[in-house]
Image (cartoon, helix red, strand yellow):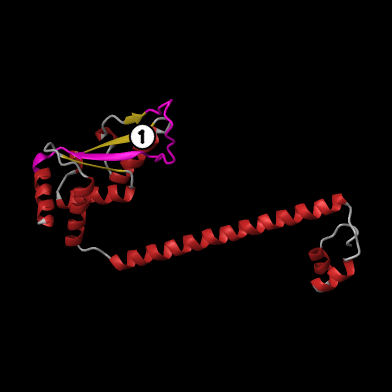
Amino acid sequence: MRKKGKSYNEIIQVLGLSKSTVSDWCKDIFLSESKIEKLYLAKKKGALKGSRIAAQRKIDKRIRLTNEIYNLGVNEIGTLNQRERFVAGIAFYASEGTKIDKGCCLSNSDPLIVKFMINWFREFGKVPSLKFRGAIWLHDGLNERKAKIYWSKLTNIPLKQFYKSYIAKDKKYSKKIRKNKHEYGVFSFYVNDTNLLRRIMGWIGGVLV
């Protein structure tokens, strides 16, 4: 078997012998360069496969740990009551919303945040569906129609209440490489109610004092 170019491990698997025994039996057998090269390539391939398996195990372990910590955080928060949702929305708007005295606007690419804040405006701002307006900021080359339908379904804002989309053209001579292009872009929703914005600003002030 050794003369045919079989490796020690292959011989061990077939004969069930120890590695020291196989090594001792085969120590005087010389292989041709082609057979040595074949064994070397097979060993290298096996080592590469082993490193890939080890790397994948590390990735799986990290994903598992990330999910465990995430779920722990979710359980620590629990179910928010009305007061807690109210304060959370104030904090979100203080961070992400516009403060210009012309009405309310909030922009984000995270659908969970957008949905939470749309519901927050409906619950605490008493904003009817007809007063919402939507718009998307999208990279050139992405499907605008698909993005608009996605956000419309998520927010329950009809497409007829969407403003014209802003399409960001790719700069031909820019050296900047965008790693992430959100498939559905960045969504903004508007409520043209100056008094509501002033009230929200009061809520923010009440939290901060």
- Look at the image and tell me whether residue 78 can be seen: no
Please state if 101 lies on the left or on the right of 89 as rendered: left
Residue at horizontal 15%, vertical 42%? 99
Residue at horizontal 27%, vertical 33%? 160
Residue at horizontal 31%, vertical 36%? 136
**In the structure shown, which secondary structural element does the residue marked by tag 1 occupy?**
strand
Please state if 10 lies on the left or on the right of 115 as rendered: right
Residue 162, position as x, y percentages in the image: 27, 34
Specify the quadrant that holds the C terminus.
Answer: bottom left
Please state if 99 lies on the left or on the right of 143 as rendered: left
Specify the quadrant that holds the N terminus.
Answer: bottom right
Residue 36, position as x, y percentages in the image: 83, 54
Residue 138 position by quadrant: top left
Which of 28/85 is in front?
28
Q: Is residue 153 above or below residue 8?
A: above
Q: In the rendered picture of this protein, how many numbered marks are placed on residues?
A: 1
Which of 63/47 is in front?
47
Residue 76, position as x, y percentages in the image: 30, 68
Residue 195 position by quadrant: top left
Q: Which residue does the numbered mark 1 point to in the structure image?
A: 138
- Decide whether residue 185 is among the magenta residues: yes
- Magenta range: 169-195
- Decide whether residue 21 is among the magenta residues: no
